[in-house]
Image (cartoon, helix red, strand yellow):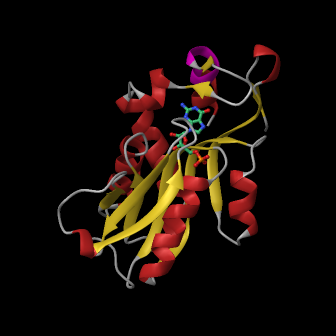
């Protein structure tokens, strides 16, 4: 998405050679029009896949996952990031390292909102090492649902996540690929 690339170039803040702050677009502020366009693009790419539910992990994936689910006309389910005291035994749980927080968190989805009959599209904001995606994929596999693919807004191709997920045979579509953050510069991969 050319427009998204431009916005990232203008509004992204390089924190280190590994981390790009995208608070102005994805992780703190949301541009509804741009986000709906991202949703349309993911919906276009996965429209033949008979998706029954869009799934993301709270919180930064929710806006774009909502836009995608709206376009596909299906529910959005967002995995919770820590244990709640409610309905624990009905929850599917995976432990994943958090790239930005440097801690391990649990991601949880209730069995009430995902089942073996589902065809799941996983949507997320950014992929780095792929831990969040792997956790989510494990939950989908455990419940016996079909994962039709993953839609990621920003793939940092200099980190291993996207490649590793594709090597598992999973279709991963990213809207923008960043090849490097070296030298204080955002270099796009395409
Ligand atoms: P992973 O599990 O793929 O290593 O990291 C994925 C999650 O970490 C994303 O959902 C995203 O919120 C966060 N993340 C990873 N890399 C970056 C980054 O460069 N900038 C920001 N803002 N978040 C990131």
Range drawn in magenta: 7-11
Q: Quadrant of residue 115?
A: bottom left
State the image coordinates of residue 88 (x, y, percent, origin top left): 24, 68
Q: Quadrant of residue 165?
A: bottom right
Is residue 77 visible from the viewing direction of this image? yes
Q: Is residue 133 left or right of residue 30?
A: right
Q: Quadrant of residue 143?
A: bottom left
State the image coordinates of residue 159 (x, y, percent, origin top left): 75, 44
Q: Main secondary structure of the magenta part?
A: helix
State the image coordinates of residue 186 (x, y, percent, origin top left): 73, 22
Q: Is residue 97 left or right of residue 113?
A: right
Q: Is residue 54 left or right of residue 155?
A: left
Q: Quadrant of ligand 1?
A: top right
Indicate whether 104 appears above or below 88: above
Q: Nearer the viewer, residue 114 or 16?
A: 16
For the image, the number of numbered tags is 0
């Amino acid at each position: 998405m050319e427009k998204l690339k431009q916005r990232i170039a203008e509004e992204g803040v390089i924190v280190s050679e590994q981390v790009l702050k995208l608070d102005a677009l994805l992780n703190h502020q949301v541009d509804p029009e741009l986000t709906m366009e991202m949703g349309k693009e993911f919906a276009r790419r996965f429209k033949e896949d008979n998706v029954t539910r869009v799934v993301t992990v709270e919180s930064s994936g929710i806006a774009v996952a909502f836009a995608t689910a709206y376009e596909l006309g299906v529910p959005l389910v967002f995995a919770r990031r820590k244990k709640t005291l409610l309905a624990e035994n009905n929850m599917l749980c995976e432990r994943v390292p958090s790239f930005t927080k440097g801690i391990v968190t649990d991601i949880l989805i209730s069995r009430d909102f995902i089942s073996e009959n589902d065809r799941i599209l996983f949507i997320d904001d950014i992929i780095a090492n792929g831990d969040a995606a792997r956790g989510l994929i494990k939950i989908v596999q455990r419940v016996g649902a079909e994962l039709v693919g993953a839609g990621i807004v920003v793939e940092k191709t200099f980190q291993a996540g996207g490649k590793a997920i594709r090597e598992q045979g999973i279709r991963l579509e990213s809207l923008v690929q960043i090849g490097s953050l070296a030298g204080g510069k955002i270099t796009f991969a395409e």
